[in-house]
Image: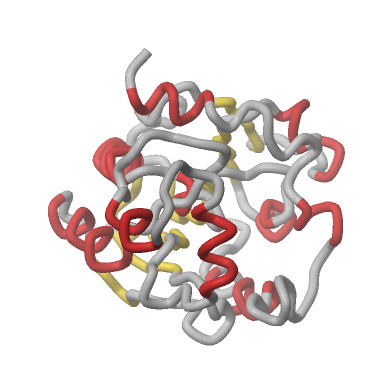
Amino acid sequence: MNKLEKELKSFQPFWKGGTNRPKIGWSRMTRGGTVDEIMIYEDCIKEFVSSDSNVLEIGCGGGFWTQKFLCAKTFVGLDALSAEHNKFWDRVPKKDGFEYFQVSDFKCNELKDDSIDYLFSYDVFCHISYSGAREYLKNLYPKLKKGAQCFIMIADKNKYTDVNGLKRLMARTSHTNLQEFFDDYDGDPANGRWYFYGSERFCSLLDEYGYKIINKDSTKISDKLSPTIHFEK
């Protein structure tokens, strides 16, 4: 089993029934007042998704964000965990053109070429190593239509300044100091750990694969801990 396969396997014991977000519901401020989910929707989804949209969500989990894509023409959700594990279809009505795939790699073979015009992923790539992010961005490119609008939230130590929160995240790994934790942005998986490769490294991958960067932090106000990169094909 290679590194990325181990990475996907490492998620299996976690988030049964979906993360807390779909269980709790929508809120103006969550996580101790650090995330405004409604503002994220308004800034990153509302004006970009319509009845003509072909949407891809990476890490759709229990369907929290998916509920904002119900107006779309088609929807594909990719997740490391099964729809049953996440109780996805308990929260998302089954519709023609709506599909869910449990993935075992980052190859995106579940998607048709030139089929997606909107991509959203929140609270997911922070759990994916730099190698995993590279593989995803490389394989996503032919699946996206020209001009596709994409939003991916990542972890960046320059924005995540809550030291106690960082120490809790570090405790999921074998590291004993934060700098060592930050430097291990392509390390082995452990307990749903976070990878802090940051905006600059992520944007260097976007440049490498030919994407156009629109905004290095579309959630500058709505998420006080993590940036969401807006880019297009």
Residue 117 percent coordinates (x, y): 43, 53
| Position of 60 relative to 213 (above/below) | above
Residue 155 percent coordinates (x, y): 43, 62
Q: Residue furthest left?
A: 208
Tell me if I can see residue 141 in this picture: no
Q: Is residue 137 left or right of residue 219?
A: left
Figure disc tally? 0
Q: Residue furthest front?
A: 176
Q: Residue furthest top?
A: 1
| Position of 169 relative to 163 (above/below) | above
Q: Residue furthest bottom?
A: 221
Tell me what residue is drawn at x 56 percent, y 77 percent. Answer: 223
Q: Nearer the viewer, residue 16 or 50?
A: 16
Tell me if I can see residue 37 in this picture: yes
Residue 167 percent coordinates (x, y): 53, 62
| Position of 85 relative to 158 (above/below) | above
Q: Nearer the viewer, residue 99 or 168?
A: 168
Tell me what residue is drawn at x 72 percent, y 39 percent. Answer: 15
Give the quarter of the figure containing the C terminus.
bottom left
Residue 127 percent coordinates (x, y): 48, 47
Q: Would you identify the image quadrant in which residue 79 lies?
A: top right
Q: Nearer the viewer, residue 81 or 60?
A: 81
Tell me what residue is drawn at x 62 percent, y 44 percent. Answer: 60
Q: Is residue 81 left or right of residue 226?
A: right
Q: Nearer the viewer, residue 94 or 5?
A: 5
Q: Is residue 68 left or right of residue 220?
A: right
Tell me what residue is drawn at x 77 percent, y 26 percent. Answer: 84
